[in-house]
Each structure stands twice: as C-alpha cells, then as structure tokens.
Amino acid sequence: MYTDVSKNSAWINGIVTGAAVPPDSPIPDVEGTAEVGNCKGAIVRAATARPEDPALALTNGHCVPSGRPAPGSALVDRPADLARPVTIADREGYPKTSARATRLVYATTTGTDIALYRLDKTYAQLAKEGAKVFGLATTPMRAGDRLLMAYSSGRPRCTVEAVVPHLREAGYQQDDSVRYAASDTCVSGPGYSGSALLTPDANTVTGINNTHNRDGERCTEGNPCEVDRDGAVKALKGRSYGQQVFRVSACLTKGSRIDLSRPGCRLTSA
C-alpha cells in the first residue's frame, strides 16, 4: 500500500511534532476468543469441573474437520482432528496461550450444533497462563435475553428476538434455536461459526452462533428455515441464529469426559 505524502503532510507533521496527535482508537475487549480449527470457539468449564481436569474447547459441530455428524447422530470420544493448536486471545485479540486438542469428546448437529475438544492443558494450567475460561450455562436462552457475541474483532451486543422451536437446514435440525434481533453488527456469516454467545458480564457461555439465512431459500444449505410447533415453515432472509448449550453440563463427568447415559443428559446419542 502507498499514498501521497504531500496530501497528508499536515497529519504527519502534527504527529511528528506532537502538536496534533489523534487519540488512539479504542481497542475492543475480546479476551477469551479462541481459534478452534477453522472456526471460532471458547474454553468452557462446567461448575462441577475440577482444576486438574483437562480444559474443554467449544465450537460448532459443523466445524469438525473430519466431517460433520450425520443427521440424528453424534460423534463421541474420537481422535482429535485439529491440525493446529487451539489459541486463546488476550483482551486485545493477540494470542495469550495455546493448547493441543487430544480428543474430540463430542460433536452433533442434531438438537444443537456443538463440538467439544479435550485439550492437553488443565484448567489450572490455563489459569496460571492467564487464559480466559468461561462458565457454561445451565439454563436456556429466552426471548428478550441480552447477549454478547464473541467475535475475534469485537463483542457486538445482541438480543434474542425469538426462540424457534425447530431450525432446519440441509437435512439437519436444531431445537429451541434463537433468532437474533435485526442488527448491523450481531450477525452470523463466513468466519463467525462457533462464536460464543456470552452473558452480558462476559463470563458465561449461554449459546453458540451457528448459521444465517443467506438467500431467502427454505431449509437449504446456508438458508435455514424456521418450523413452528404446528409445522408451519418460514424463511427469513438475512437473519442469524444461535444454538443452546445448557444441556451440555449434565452430560460431563470428571476428567472432562462425556456420559450420554447420565440422568438429566439430553444430548443426541451416537
């Protein structure tokens, strides 16, 4: 890139002499945003997790590099398939630390759209390295809830406009999905898959961003459709959606493992 110095001489002289130094642009706080494969994500911790348990990275199930789970199924306790370490950002978005994924603990795109990777560092180790770890919500998102979306470049404010009974896309279905209120900033799009939906205090993951109706088509790839309790179908062009994660904690056991037979666990089985 280059520019005409003479046209910008006043600006350059002001900075060099200190007579007219513009204020720094505010840097958004994006602490804890993780890169998980080719998607965004976050390091999450259930309330019952112990410091010595391996940390868990959360992203979308459709982001699994080896292939998303088939409709109605889940992937459980598989070899990790991430070519690069999971990196965790500091407040300004620079890498704070990283960890390798050792196992794909669980992934599904049925009922919700999540993947959990077990890392080679414990919660205690990440805390010592100053990495942000988020709590994991145990209650569902509701219409009217205020959220923050954990982009790598900012934390746009979002509002849950509606809870959609069923969201269908290319043969997959998620339940109790949330549609965000129309916004220029709170949107899903290429590169935003897996972005955590945070509580307003930015300490708890309450959902996960996953899809957007691109063209106004109904129920096709890249064009999710809404299905109400009576079976009526509609597609809202340009609208974005996120998925619930409140069912995850009930399925987690010590050592950051998953047990789909646990009482109260309602995630899709393999």
Image: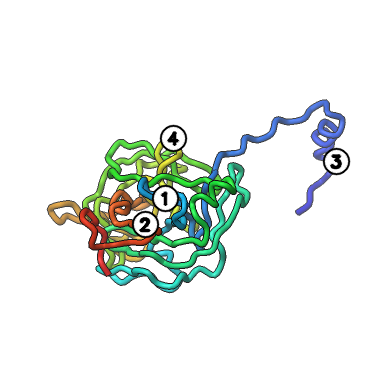
Q: Which residue is mark 4?
A: 201
Which is closer to the viewer, label 4 or label 3?
A: 4
Mark 4 vs mark 2, CA separation in Å: 27 Å
Name which residue lies at 33% across and 61% down: 258
Q: Secondary structure at mark 4?
A: loop
Find out whether the residues at labels 1 and 2 contact each other: C-beta distance under 8 Å: yes
- Marks 2 and 3, the one that precedes in the sequence: 3
Give the residue displayed 40% in from the left and 60% down from the top.
116
Identify the coloring. rainbow
Question: Mark 3 is on which residue type?
Answer: Ser
Badge 1 density bin: few <14, some 14–19, many ≥20, Cα 10 Å: some
Q: Which mark is residue 254?
A: 2
Gap between marks 1 and 2 measured at Cα:
8 Å
Which mark is nearer the camera, 4 or 2?
Answer: 2
Image check: 64 left or right of 263?
right
Residues under labels 3 and 1: Cα distance?
A: 61 Å
**Residue 105: image x %, image y %?**
39, 64
Marks 3/1 in contact by CB < 8 Å: the verdict is no
Q: Could you tell me residue 146's position as x and y percent?
A: 37, 36
Q: Which mark is residue 50?
A: 1
Element type where label 1 sits in the image:
loop
- CA gap between label 2 and label 3 equals 65 Å
